[in-house]
């Protein structure tokens, strides 16, 4: 079974609360960021309307030119004049609409990203390293202590006790035994081993 949380109740509860809080935070601000983007992007409709108006004007000039092309003698000149006149007015309008739509879309993306950076990055910058370290520690300890060893339990307990005495500070050791050095010297390794297991999130 893949280890996701520590085995100790208090440590596991702390990790689970942090995981749930992070998920809720991401959902809350992610939804707000998406709504902000949609709200700002909706103003791009003005650009699309202007572009459509310009394209309609250009097309109207073509249609008018085609209808006037049948005039005797001057049909082709009148057709070209009508097309050019309408295109001269409609094409800049269409280009402006396209640029306005793109500008509004870019502004919507930038502002949404800025909001996401301000609200999500500081939280994740603290949560992810902390959570990754705890996950890596409990998984590594579980494999090294529970899965990999091929020796007697007493020797594992002695090794864990030795790590506890050499690695943990005295205040931590005193939480598990009133005489940590005496336990080690006299071969009472169970409480020291429990202290070492607890430090990596494992139950005895």
Image: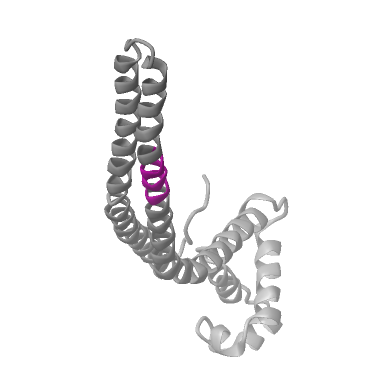
Q: Main secondary structure of the magenta part?
A: helix
Up-down relation of residue 198 to residue 65 (above or below): below
In the picture, measured across the screen, residue 16 lies left or right of residue 134, that is: left
- Residue at horizontal 31 percent and vertical 36 percent from the top: 52
Describe the colour scheme in one phrase.
Answer: one colour
Q: How many badges with numbers are in the image?
A: 0
**Of 152 and 149, which appears nearest the observer?**
149
Up-down relation of residue 44 to residue 82 (above or below): below
- Residue at horizontal 69 percent and vertical 74 percent from the top: 163
In the picture, measured across the screen, residue 127 lies left or right of residue 195, that is: left
Q: For residue 58, which quarter of the picture?
A: top left
Q: Is residue 98 magenta?
A: yes
Whether residue 9 is visible? no
**Of 165 and 34, which appears nearest the observer?**
34
The segment highlighted magenta reads 91-100
In the picture, measured across the screen, residue 165 lies left or right of residue 82, that is: right
Q: Position of residue 12 (x, y in %)?
A: 42, 64
- Find the residue positioned furthest to the front: 73
Q: Position of residue 121 (x, y in %)?
A: 47, 67
Q: Position of residue 175 (x, y in %)?
A: 50, 84
In the picture, measured across the screen, residue 85 lies left or right of residue 185, that is: left
Q: For residue 18, which quarter of the picture?
A: bottom left
**Of 95 and 145, which appears nearest the observer?**
95
Up-down relation of residue 127 to residue 151 (above or below): below
Whether residue 96 is visible? yes
Q: Position of residue 198 (x, y in %)?
A: 53, 70
- Residue at horizontal 33 percent and vertical 27 percent from the top: 61
Q: Is residue 40 magenta?
A: no
Q: For residue 31, which quarter of the picture?
A: bottom left
């Amino acid at each position: 079974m893949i280890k996701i949380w520590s085995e100790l109740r208090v440590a596991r509860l702390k990790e689970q609360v942090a995981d749930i809080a992070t998920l809720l935070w991401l959902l809350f601000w992610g939804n707000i960021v998406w709504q902000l983007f949609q709200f700002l992007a909706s103003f791009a409709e003005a650009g699309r309307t202007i572009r459509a108006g310009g394209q309609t004007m250009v097309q109207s000039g073509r249609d008018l030119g085609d209808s006037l092309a049948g005039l005797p003698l001057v049909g082709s000149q009148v057709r070209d004049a009508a097309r050019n006149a309408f295109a001269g007015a409609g094409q800049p309008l269409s280009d402006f609409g396209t640029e306005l739509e793109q500008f509004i879309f870019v502004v919507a993306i930038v502002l949404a990203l800025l909001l996401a950076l301000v609200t999500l990055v500081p939280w994740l910058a603290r949560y992810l390293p902390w959570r990754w370290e705890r996950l890596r520690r409990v998984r590594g300890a579980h494999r090294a202590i529970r899965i990999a060893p091929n020796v007697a339990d007493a020797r594992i307990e002695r090794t864990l006790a030795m790590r506890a005495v050499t690695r943990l500070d005295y205040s931590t050791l005193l939480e598990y035994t009133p005489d940590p050095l005496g336990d080690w010297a006299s071969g009472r390794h169970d409480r020291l081993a429990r202290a070492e297991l607890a430090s990596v999130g494992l139950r005895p």
